[in-house]
């Protein structure tokens, strides 16, 4: 089955060797989204709610670029640098998935840049 690379002008390009998202059949694999706006600027330094919102906006843009909606997201993995940020993250996360949220794992990690508090990776079934 061929794959299609999905991009959105609303999501900053990475200098890393990765695709923003890859569509294989009707399954969309989303790269780890961090708090970068479309210009590549970090958003919400020290603010888990702002960073969660930006990461989810990046995911939303990619899902929509593939022809789907946030209701099509079936699984996410949330990477937090501090589990004390769970409540703030969940508050924003719930607003993007108010009904039948995707399956999710939440893991405490160190991220590639100290200003990032969160990274969210996911899978969606579109079409």
Image: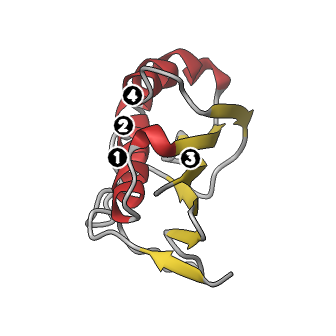
Disc 1 + disc 2, Cβ < 8 Å: yes
Q: In this view, does 45 lie to the left or right of 111?
A: left
* Mark-to-mark CA distance, 1 and 2: 6 Å
Tally the marks. 4
User: Where is residue 99 drawn, in percent x and y?
Assistant: 46, 20
Q: Which of marks 3 and 1 is in front?
A: 1
Residue, x 39% and y 28% (percent of image)?
49
Packing grade of label 1 (10 A; few <14, some 14-19, many >=20) is many
Res 57 label: 1
What is the secondary structure assignment of the residue under circle 1? helix
For marks 3 and 2 on the same chain, the one whose residue lies earlier in the sequence:
2
* Mark-to-mark CA distance, 4 and 1: 12 Å
Q: Mark 4 points at which residue?
A: 49
* Mark-to-mark CA distance, 3 and 1: 12 Å
Q: In this view, does 97 lie to the left or right of 9?
A: right
* Mark-to-mark CA distance, 3 and 2: 11 Å
For marks 3 and 4 on the same chain, the one whose residue lies earlier in the sequence:
4
Q: Nearer the viewer, residue 59 or 124?
A: 124
What is the secondary structure assignment of the residue under circle 3? strand
Disc 3 + disc 2, Cβ < 8 Å: no
Residue, x 54% and y 27% (percent of image)?
101
Q: Name the residue under label 2.
A: 53
Packing grade of label 3 (10 A; few <14, some 14-19, many >=20) is many
Q: Nearer the viewer, residue 90 or 25?
A: 25
For marks 4 and 1 on the same chain, the one whose residue lies earlier in the sequence:
4
Residue, x 72% and y 42% (percent of image)?
109
Disc 2 + disc 4, Cβ < 8 Å: yes
* Mark-to-mark CA distance, 3 and 4: 12 Å
Vertical position of residue 89 compared to residue 30: above or below: above
Q: Mark 3 points at which residue?
A: 119
User: Where is residue 115 drawn, in percent x and y?
Assistant: 48, 47
Which quadrant would residue 112 be assigned to in this image?
A: bottom right
């Amino acid at each position: 089955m061929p794959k299609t690379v999905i991009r959105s002008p609303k999501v900053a390009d990475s200098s890393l060797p990765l695709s923003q998202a890859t569509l294989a059949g009707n399954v969309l694999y989303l790269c780890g989204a961090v708090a970068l706006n479309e210009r590549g600027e970090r958003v919400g330094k020290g603010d888990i709610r702002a960073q969660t919102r930006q990461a989810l906006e990046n995911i939303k843009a990619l899902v929509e670029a593939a022809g789907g909606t946030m209701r099509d997201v079936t699984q996410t993995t949330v990477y937090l640098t501090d589990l004390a940020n769970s409540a703030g993250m969940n508050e924003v996360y719930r607003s993007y998935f108010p009904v039948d949220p995707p399956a999710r794992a939440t893991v405490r990690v160190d991220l590639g840049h100290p200003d990032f508090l969160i990274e969210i990776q996911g899978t969606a079934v579109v079409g």
